[in-house]
Image (cartoon, grey):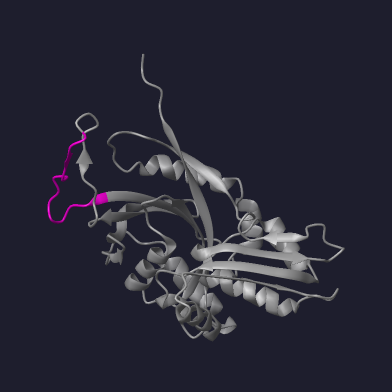
Amino acid sequence: KLPKKTMRELSINYYKITPLVSEEQLFESQEELKSAFHFPNDREYNSVYQTNGTVDLYGDRVLRNNYILGTFTFIQLENIPPKQNTITKNIEDLQLEETDGLGHQTSFLFDTLTNIIVVVSRRPGVNTSSIYRFVKENFDICRFSLEFIQKPSSLENFLRTSSYKKLKVKLAHPTAIGHLIGEDSSVKNTLDLMDKFASNKISFEVESMTRESLDIGTVRNFVNLVRRNFSENIEVLRITGNDENVEEKTFDFISNRIKQKIEVEVTRFGNFRTKEVYDQLVLKYSEVVVSLRNTYSNINE
């Protein structure tokens, strides 16, 4: 009797890639980013450092209709644990050459009509900060953000709401902040404040003590700022509205993210299973592609 397959669920995260440029430069910058995220196969790429290893591209990118499918790899070169015998409990170093490491697959789907990238989340793996640095290292490109994508209906309700009663936020300190600061003084001030108190987290809550709303523009700009600059570090981002004309009263930018999962087989040894993952990414993206393209289509698409 063959043993039952063991499957592992992996989350997939959706990000909108947005140029941080003026309105006049938006179309050109959007096209440049689209070209970069094609990651053409006919060139070489410089790897970037991620804690304990390096990040690079693996294999060729695959074009399916308007999707680019590819795989980043995190090669773990440092802090590699030993092998251990389950019976004797003895440990030994893994027999690795100087340039060998442990390979960890992080596959993605890039939609060229929306500049949305769908990334498989796994640890160890490649994080969005490393993806950002990889693109900046290999392309002469503008600053951009990778914003978590909310369920379209919830985001529409948030923007329809004409009155906000309370805002609550909790952020973890980014581990790689160089690209976040740029010329945005509000981001720099937030990070400086965290450093001043030797804190790796910051949280606060503001509330209107009257029936009137918090300043609508300030709330929306702050939410936009946090989503663009701290997407991986948001632990709480919740706004309470009190607009009687909108049924949804609490907008939770964590729980209202698009949530999907794929499954991969767990094996003792194995190669990167890119085609298996690509097939599942295309299938999952097809479930939401219509609403996402209605909301996020590129200019002139």
Q: Residue furthest front?
A: 197
Q: Is residue 141 visible?
A: no
Where is residue 57 shown, x and y percent of the image? Answer: 31, 57
Question: Is residue 149 found inside the magenta-colored segment of the image?
Answer: no
Locate residue 36, reporting x and y percent. 40, 67
Q: Quadrant of the N terminus?
A: top left
The secondary structure that dominates the magenta segment is loop
- Front residue of 68 and 202: 202
Instruction: Residue at 19%, 31% (x, y): give it.
Output: 88
Question: From where the camera sits, is residue 134 visible?
Answer: yes
Q: Nearer the viewer, residue 256 or 293?
A: 256
Vertical position of residue 38 compared to residue 278: above or below:
below
In magenta, the rendered stretch is 89-102
Query: Compared to 254, does 214 lie above or below?
Result: below
- The foreground one among 108 and 246 is 246
- The number of numbered badges drawn on the structure is 0
Image spot of residue 132 (x, y percent): 41, 68
Residue 100 highlighted magenta (yes or no): yes
Residue at image location 53% in from the left, 42% down from the top? 283
Please, which residue is most extreme toward the top here? 1
Between 170 and 283, the one lying in front of the other is: 170
Write the residue at 52% across / 83% down. 189
Q: Quadrant of the C terminus?
A: bottom right
Taking the spot 27% from the left edge, 55% from the top edge, the residue there is 75
Image location (x, y in percent) of residue 13: 51, 54
Seen in the image, is 75 located left or right of residue 149? left
Q: Is residue 91 above or below residue 255?
A: above
